Amino acid sequence: MKALSLLLTMALSAGVHAQEKPFYPAPAKPLKAEYTIYSGGLGDEQAPTKTDRKLAIDIKGQAAKDIFDSLYPDAKGVSCSGEAGERLRRKGHVWCASSPRDGYRCFLGFDLRSGASIAGGSC
């Protein structure tokens, strides 16, 4: 009888643990973004070549807001659109904008030949 009771307890315990979902303190989240692979410079993008390939990523929505919120404080005296309420934040080559008209957007860039971080957007 004790053996049966112990066996049932173990089986129930295993079933409970099997149904638990793993805990990830920093889970992956969906991302709404567009990207461009190009050569040349920002604002004068050309078709990518074998020797010049860059990646520009434009992130929008909740992911952009999360990144924006992590880059505080706001840049002072800088504006891209001149729109009232526009806010800009930047750390290195990562920069984000918040505007009443367009919402949140963040820009990342990489030189695909060297792997170096570069600007991914410009005003």
Image (cartoon, rainbow, N blue to C red):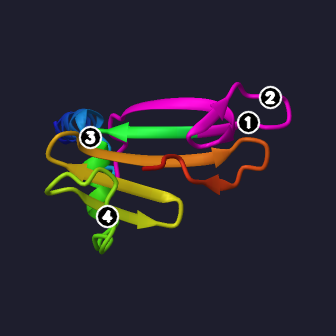
Q: Report the residue marked by disc 1.
A: 53
Inspect the image, locate mark 2, and give the three-letter code of the amino acid beneath it.
Thr
- The tag earlier along the polypeptide, 2 or 3, is 3
Label number found at residue 49: 2
**Residue 40 falls within the magenta-colored stretch:** yes
**Which SS class for mark 4?**
helix
| Horizontal and vertical percent position of residue 84 | 14, 55
Inspect the image, locate mark 4, and give the three-letter code of the amino acid beneath it.
Ser
Inspect the image, locate mark 3, and give the three-letter code of the amino acid beneath it.
His
- The tag earlier along the polypeptide, 4 or 1, is 1
Inspect the image, locate mark 1, and give the three-letter code of the amino acid beneath it.
Arg
| Horizontal and vertical percent position of residue 39 | 71, 35
Q: Which residues are magenta?
A: 26-55
Q: Report the residue marked by disc 4.
A: 70
Give the alpha-carbon distance from disc 4 to disc 1, as whole Å: 29 Å
**Which SS class for mark 1?**
loop
Q: Is residue 41 above or below residue 66?
A: above
